[in-house]
Image (spheres, rainbow, N blue to C red):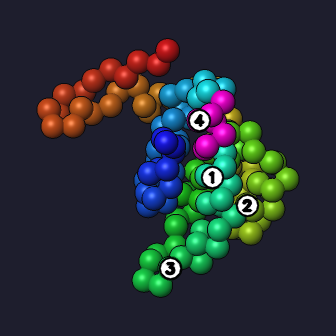
Amino acid sequence: GSIAGPLWSLPLEDLANVLRAIASLLVEPSRLGPATLEQLQCGLTALLNSRSIVEPNPGEAPPSAQVIMQLAAAWSWLGLEQQALASSCTRWGVSLSQVEAIALSWRTAQGHSQWCIAESRGTGHPIQASVS
């Protein structure tokens, strides 16, 4: 089964947060392993090429620019087609340079600092998240 399957059913904001966490913790996408990397690449490509990004279903609010930028940064971090990313950023009205800066911060582990301390659900005690 695909571990990425349930991921794509998340609301876009949650999906963006999950992808940001993965990128921030792993730093390099190669740490995902080839099968997982391919699943994330395929799923994100399908999602970002779908109309629902810019034309949500009736009654749904469109995603914020921050969410769009994080999803686009995940695209860049995963090493997907840069030409397609550039045209998509234009279509979504977000800055390609900002998107690439976010992805670069993940690759250089600068995006990691905010994930060092995570709240343990239920206890309220901070736990140290280790990155190997």
* Rendering coords of residue 57 (x, y %): 50, 79
- According to the picture, the residue beneath numbered tag 1 turns out to be 44
- According to the picture, the residue beneath numbered tag 3 turns out to be 57
Give the main secondary structure of the magenta stretch: helix
Up/down of 46 relative to 106, above or below: below
Instruction: Give amino acid for label 4.
Output: Thr
- According to the picture, the residue beneath numbered tag 4 turns out to be 36
The residues tagged by marks 3 and 1 sit, at their Cα atoms, a distance apart of: 19 Å
- According to the picture, the residue beneath numbered tag 2 turns out to be 89
Magenta residues, start to end = 34-40
* Rendering coords of residue 52 (x, y %): 58, 72
Of tags 4 and 3, which is closer to the observer? Answer: 4
Do tag 3 and tag 1 residues touch (Cβ < 8 Å)? no
Of tags 4 and 1, which is closer to the observer? Answer: 4
Instruction: Give amino acid for label 3.
Output: Asn
The residues tagged by marks 2 and 3 sit, at their Cα atoms, a distance apart of: 21 Å
Q: SS for tag 1?
A: helix
Instruction: Give amino acid for label 2.
Output: Cys
Up/down of 3 relative to 29, above or below: below
Mark 3 Cα-neighbour bin, 10 Å: few <14, some 14–19, many ≥20? few
The residue under the point 80% across, 48% down is 81
The residues tagged by marks 2 and 1 sit, at their Cα atoms, a distance apart of: 14 Å
Instruction: Give amino acid for label 1.
Output: Leu
Rendered image quadrant of residue 117: top left
